[in-house]
Image (cartoon, rainbow, N blue to C red):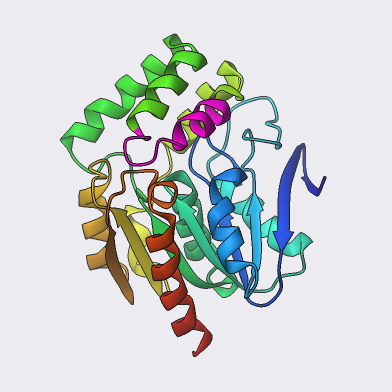
Amino acid sequence: MPEYQRDEVTLYYEVQGSGRPIVFTHGASWNHKQWQRQVEYFSPYYQTIVWDVRGHGGSNLPSGKVDPEDFSRDLIHLLDTLKIERAVLCGLSMGGHISLQTAVRYPQRVDGLVLIGTPFTNAFNWYEKIFVPVNRWSNRLMPMKLAGKIQAKVLSTYNKENKIYIEEAFQSIPHNNWIRLWDAVTRMESKDDLEKVKCPTLLLQGEHDTMIRRQQKYMAENIPDSRLKIISHAHHATNLDNPQEVNEEMALFLEEIDQL
């Protein structure tokens, strides 16, 4: 089982294929298996790397408060471990925000960004400023099994196969770990950093993903050299709902980067 060590955390990863590296980072409460259809599609032409963010899947979570900055540090350490100087970063939701922050903090390591259903703040409008603190509190009270079932039901509307995967991934995280992880994820903030992104950026938004719609539009207006594409028949689990359209949009974007 491929793992790498960073301080007190052991992180799981998988590598397939060769060529320009693409690092895929999953959403909060999920794991590397989210990217199976992308790995199958791109690994014949690129080097695909998937990994489990600390506290998810096969990666552990050290005790104590989780520092949101550790997410991007872990990603860079993974690149160092694999002796990769530069890569394209692709992430969904939390994974997109981690990829975004990595591109801002380590611009010399990133050739391009694919941000799928990605937030850049948890205080974008009055709704989020009220909802996020309430959500942190409710996470402390709600059992993981129930929370996983609710999330799976909402995010399997356009692909029924999502349900089993989302439930299993969510419920594999110990409750105390999830409380600490979600506190860190909801403290990530990049609103003042969008203009610092120096690489080409593709924003992909599910047609029915109302969770981050306003933020996607704002990012498209404030990240230089970025463009926004809408993925049909998809909600927040965009690459699971419509993997074919996501893969096609990514392939076009990667071809453009390869020509730079």
Question: As rendered, which of 227 and 177 lies closer to the eye?
Answer: 227
Look at the picture and state if 223 lies above or below 215.
below
| Magenta-colored stretch includes residue 166 | yes
Can residue 244 be found in the magenta stretch? no
Quarter of the image holding residue 64? top right
Question: Which residue appears at 71% of the width and 36% of the height?
Answer: 58
Q: How many marks?
A: 0
Q: Position of residue 246 (x, y in %)?
A: 40, 61
Relative to residue 23, is residue 114 drawn left or right? Answer: left
Looking at the rendering, which quadrant does residue 223 occupy? bottom left
Residue 219 x %, y % = 28, 60
Instruction: Name the quarter where the N terminus is drawn.
Output: top right
Q: Is residue 133 left or right of residue 165?
A: left
Q: Residue at the location (68% across, 25% down)?
A: 63
**Is residue 25 among the parts visible in the rendering?**
no
Farthest residue to the right: give it. Answer: 1
- Give the residue at the far left of this rendering: 126
Residue at 23% in and 27% down: 130
Closest to the observer: 119 or 208? 208
Front in this rendered view, residue 31 or 161: 161
Q: Position of residue 46 (x, y in %)?
A: 63, 73
Whether residue 142 can be seen here: yes
Which segment is the magenta one?
Answer: 155-170
Extreme residue toward the bottom, this view: 259
